[in-house]
Amino acid sequence: MEPVTIVVMPRDKFSVMERCLDDILKNTPEPFELWVLSGGTPEAAKKRWQERYASRAKFTFFPEYRNGADLRDHALDLLSTKLAVFVDNDVYVRPGWLEALVRCQRETGAAMVTPLILDRDERIHTAGGDFILMKKNGTTYASMELRYQHHRVLGALNLTRRETDLCEIHCTLVDVAVLKKIRPYDKSLREFQEMDSSLSLSKNGCRMMFEPESVVYLFYEDKLTDPQDMRFHMWKWDMRAMHEGFDHFKKKWGYDINPNNSFDKYLRAVNRRVGFFSRRWPSAASAKLDQIGHRIGKRSWAGP
């Protein structure tokens, strides 16, 4: 297999980085280069990562928090291989993941390839996606439909390779030369990067593919438990920044992706991953208090 560069970056947590890197090193055949890009990383985490992976990974650290689009765009200038994979650090790869992505790109010439992404309880997070437009009263609304989302995976699937309108940002293999030319990652967006980058690729006539033989797992937490993650998570999902992103996307593409603030319910749920006490006093003690409150809340909703 030809050399590939794997670029890993935090999505909204730092604590999952080592599990992500360990799985990549365990489940990926040589040769490959490994880069880690991160912004606002706690000093203890930086030291730990560099000591543990000094012989296998190259690191680029920024003093301030950086969103995923910003880090991906910066990474493009570091790449020298024909192909690269961008991986959020809450993604855990499985055996055969990279070989299948590379094979798909080689056989289809796609500019971007997305794997089958699973999440909690081995359910499908996405198997590719569709971009949906709807016009009403002179306004164009856009949304993405993630194929087969929430379906439980109990065994072998009959999913087949197919074209996709968009590739979820969590894990994508890319043709480096194409992306260096198009520069599809918009630093003004903390979220909705898959919609934005996929629109940029489509506008330039680029092909995107879903490859089901490549499987990765997206890790979720109901409540954050590690203090090093809390401020970063709050920064990433800041509601004001999200609404600025909605406005930016609409000005850029002419599509409203938050009609009547409909996306706010999801954003509020994501923000609740940092509990009441941790939001005010991020620490191990506040995390324990929030976990207790979360368990009590779940029991009260479940009834007697």
Image: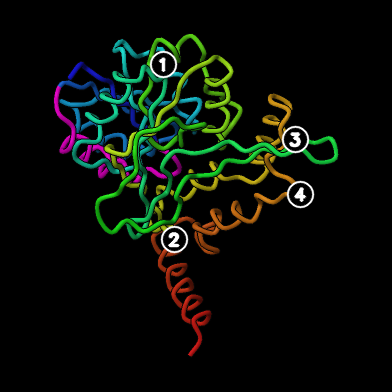
Callouts 1 and 4 close, C-beta under 8 Å: no
Question: Residue type at mark 4?
Answer: Asn
Q: How many residues crowd mark 3 within 10 Å: few (<14), some (14–19), many (20+)?
A: some
Please tell me the numbered disc located at residue 222: 2
Point 49% across, 46% down: residue = 233
The residues colored magenta run 10-30
Q: CA distance from mark 1 to mark 4?
A: 36 Å
Label 2 vs 1, first from the N-terminus: 1
Q: How many residues crowd mark 2 within 10 Å: few (<14), some (14–19), many (20+)?
A: few
Q: CA distance from mark 2 to mark 3?
A: 34 Å
Question: Residue type at mark 2?
Answer: Asp
Label 3 vs 4, first from the N-terminus: 3
- In the picture, measured across the screen, residue 277 lies left or right of residue 261, that is left
Residue underneath mark 1:
76
Whole-percent x and y of residue 94? 23, 42
Looking at the image, is 34 positioned above or below residue 266?
above
Whole-percent x and y of residue 106? 29, 18
